[in-house]
Image (cartoon, helix red, strand yellow):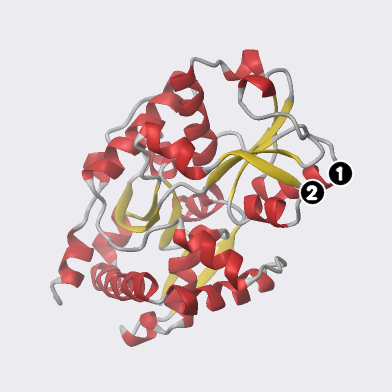
Amino acid sequence: MARLNYSGSIYATTSVVAVERGYFDEEGLIVNASPESSGQVALSALIGGSTDFAVGANVRPIQALARDLPIKVIALSTYGFAGYVIVPAHDTTTKSLEELKGKSLAVQVGSGTHTVWLRYLALKGIDEKASFKIRNMDTEQIPAAFESKSVEGGIAWDPFASVILDKKLGRAILGPKEIAEPLKVTYPFFVMTTDNVIRGKTETVQRFANAWVKTLKYIHENKDEVAEIMTAFFAREGLKLQPKLIRDMLGRSHFDRAAVSDADIEDTMASARIQYEQKRLRKLPDLRKAVDNSFVERAQRGR
């Protein structure tokens, strides 16, 4: 028996497919999997001991490690940035960040997407506080803010960004590729556990990794079938999305490896430095010391 908490967005794909396709069952592992509103909630459950595994954006283990919490990163869930800068549909003139200056922007402050946004602003020589009126808002609430016309722009990730675009509530002035490529962002989503789980449930962790590697291979090779699975998942979460839209979102994410790479670590540390400079972290931990690829590597070798 194991417990898994994960962020209920497009980044939930590996967690959802692992359960729906029965890969945990194949490993003789009963998994109680629960979607959460954010990776922060999933991480809090892990720290509090109410779950064994948590999936969250790259900044989440850094936030725990900065508090000296015994978090370990044992795998990738997916990688690939899915954030957009969007303006309302009635704004037919804004085309650049410079034209957004002085306007109210909705963003989930402290999230991984927000941190990449800050890195992008730094690259462009733009100060967030001096240039924009930031409204801290859970990303799942940003589509409603666009619908009510209560904001003049937003930084959101999928599927909520695609909801705004698909409903024609807004249009993107910057997409994932335009933001990520100049920064060399891989934007990994990590599978996290704790030292205690690794020591006390070593065989469970290995079985989890075995199932995880199988799941990633299936997703990488079967995007159309996965789109159907995720369509049903989002419907259960109250989001009615077309399979084609989800297929497009999956095409912007990557599921071709389970091990954390040097590029993932470097990208994460670049975001961590931003949070440290903003005093959101009390210290700057070394993520590399918390990464343990041994379980997925053993799974890939067939144990």
The image quarter in which residue 134 lies: top right
- The residue that mark 2 highlights is 144
Image quarter in which the C terminus is found: bottom left
Residue at (24% x, 67% y) in the render: 202
Q: Is residue 283 visible?
A: yes
* Quadrant assignment, res 229: bottom right
Find out whether the residues at labels 1 and 2 contact each other: C-beta distance under 8 Å. yes
Q: Amino acid at mark 1?
A: Ser
Percent from the top left, x then y, of residue 23?
37, 81
Of residue 51 and residue 157, the one placed in the foreground of this image is: 157
The quarter holding residue 75 reads bottom left
- For mark 2, give the secondary structure: helix
Q: Residue drawn at (34%, 69%), measured in percent from left and top?
A: 216
Q: What residue do we see at 65% from left, 53% from top?
A: 160
Question: In this picture, is 244 found above or below 190?
Answer: below
Between marks 1 and 2, how big is the CA–CA gap?
6 Å
Residue 178 position within the rendered picture, expressed as x and y whole percent measured from the top left: 47, 38
Q: Helix, strand or loop at disc 1?
A: loop
Question: Circle 1 sits on which residue?
Answer: 148
Q: Residue at x 77, y 48 (%)?
A: 169
Name the kind of residue labelled 2 in the image.
Ala
